[in-house]
Image (tube, helix red, strand yellow):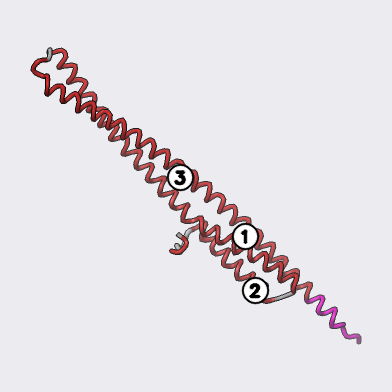
Amino acid sequence: MELPNTEELEELKGKKFTKRVALMTAVYAVVLAITALGGNKTMKELLLTQQQSSDQWAFYQAKVIREHLYRSQKMRLELDLLERSDRMKPAVKEKLETLLKRMDEEESRYNAEKKEIEKEAKKLEGERDHYRAKDPYFEFAEVLLQIAIVMSSIAILSNAHPVFFFSLISAFLGAILSFNGFFMIIHLPFFH
């Protein structure tokens, strides 16, 4: 009976380790790709909702300006009526009172419209803040997964089991942060 060469056994054991680490590295890369996709989508949504919110606030400001314009016109008409009411012709007075009523209606309309716009702007700000809260989880997850890939590559080259275990821990933490980025189960205060 022939005994196997110890060098061949070590080489086979090394190949087995290398294959496992290479397979895990591929898994890390898939998780990293999913994380990057989630991070990119979150950033796009963050920017989009920020822009939409800014647009709504600009629209709100336009309504406020129009409301104040009608209010100042109304006040001016009220002053004219108060000042010259007794000297005005009835037709002119009636026309000014009609204009005053119209100015009051327009002011009220703009006041009501701006409240709707404000609600929408605040809703968009809430969505923006939600995406802003998700973003750091994806960023840190990507870093940890990239570190895991590098460390597993080093483990293959050096045949070092502790380096591979470090890559497993890094990938596990990255996967947890990525998962949390998608579902926001835990809010870590130092990420905000």
- For the view shown, which residue lies furthest in the front direction? 83
Left or right of 98 in this view: 115: right
The quarter of the rendered structure image containing the N terminus is bottom right
Count of numbered circles in the view? 3
Measured along the vertical axis of the image, is residue 124 above or below residue 169? above
Q: Nearer the viewer, mark 3 or mark 2?
A: 3
- Secondary structure category for the residue under label 3: helix
Left or right of 75 in this view: 52: right
The picture places residue 7, in percent across and down from the top left corner, at: 85, 80
The quarter of the rendered structure image containing the C terminus is bottom left
Q: Earlier in the sequence, mark 2 or mark 1?
A: 1
Measured along the vertical axis of the image, is residue 174 above or below residue 76? below
Instruction: From the image, tell me which residue sits under label 2.
Output: 165
Q: Residue 50 has which mark? A: 3
Instruction: From the image, tell me which residue sits under label 1.
Output: 31
Say whether residue 23 is magenta: no
Q: Earlier in the sequence, mark 3 or mark 1?
A: 1
Q: Which residues are magenta?
A: 1-13
Residue at image point 55% right, 53% down: 39
Residue at image point 55% right, 64% down: 176
Q: Amino acid at mark 2?
A: Phe
Q: Nearer the viewer, mark 3 or mark 1?
A: 3
The picture places residue 180, in percent across and down from the top left corner, at: 51, 61
Would you identify the image quadrant in which residue 10 lies? bottom right
**Dominant secondary structure (helix, strand or loop) of the stretch shown in magenta:** helix
